[in-house]
Amino acid sequence: MKDKLLNTIVEGLQGCKARDIKIIDMSRLEEAAFNYFVVCEGNSSTQVYGIANNLMKHVHDSLGQRNQGTVGMQNKMWIAIDYGYILVHVFQPETRQFYSLESLWEDAGITSIENDD
């Protein structure tokens, strides 16, 4: 990956043990509002919240960049973090399965990132 912000996001997610990370490249889709979705999951509401918080800190510490907004920090089932052209989704497994973003955007290129154990 050539994109510095995207790389930093993936590194941050791996560093806080996010599971099943996928990058959905929507840059070639006219109807897409973002160039990339980064989708991952944590096993509990506590882990989802921790992943989101640690990711925001990692990106800020590494690049000096803050997100443009978050949604879902209260319910901790699905947290979305807006980085302008990249939207990060941190899910609990059941919520991720229900919304199935990877299926909705199957026309886009999807890259799976190995779990960093």
Image (cartoon, grey):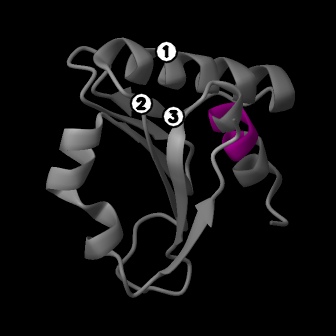
Q: Is residue 106 above or below residue 11?
A: below
Q: Are marks 2 and 1 in contact (CB under 8 Å)?
A: yes
Which numbered marker is on residue 68? 3
Q: Nearer the viewer, mark 2 or mark 1?
A: 2
The percent position of residue 6, horizontal first and vertical second, equals 71, 52
Q: How much space separates mark 3 and mark 1, taking CA atoms?
A: 19 Å
**Residue at (85%, 66%) from the top-left corner?**
2
Kindly report the secondary structure that dominates the magenta region of the rendered protein: helix
Q: Quadrant of the N terminus?
A: bottom right
Q: Label 1 sits on what residue type?
A: Gly
Residue to which mark 1 is pinned? 50
Q: Label 2 sits on what residue type?
A: Gly
Q: Earlier in the sequence, mark 2 or mark 1?
A: 2
Determine crowd level at label 1: few under 14, some 14-19, many 20+ residues with C-alpha closer than 10 A. Answer: some
Q: Earlier in the sequence, mark 3 or mark 1?
A: 1
The percent position of residue 114, horizontal first and vertical second, equals 66, 54
Residue to which mark 2 is pinned? 42
- Is 113 contained in the magenta span? no
Q: Is residue 110 above or below residue 59?
A: below
Number of marks in picture: 3
Q: How much space separates mark 2 and mark 1, taking CA atoms?
A: 9 Å
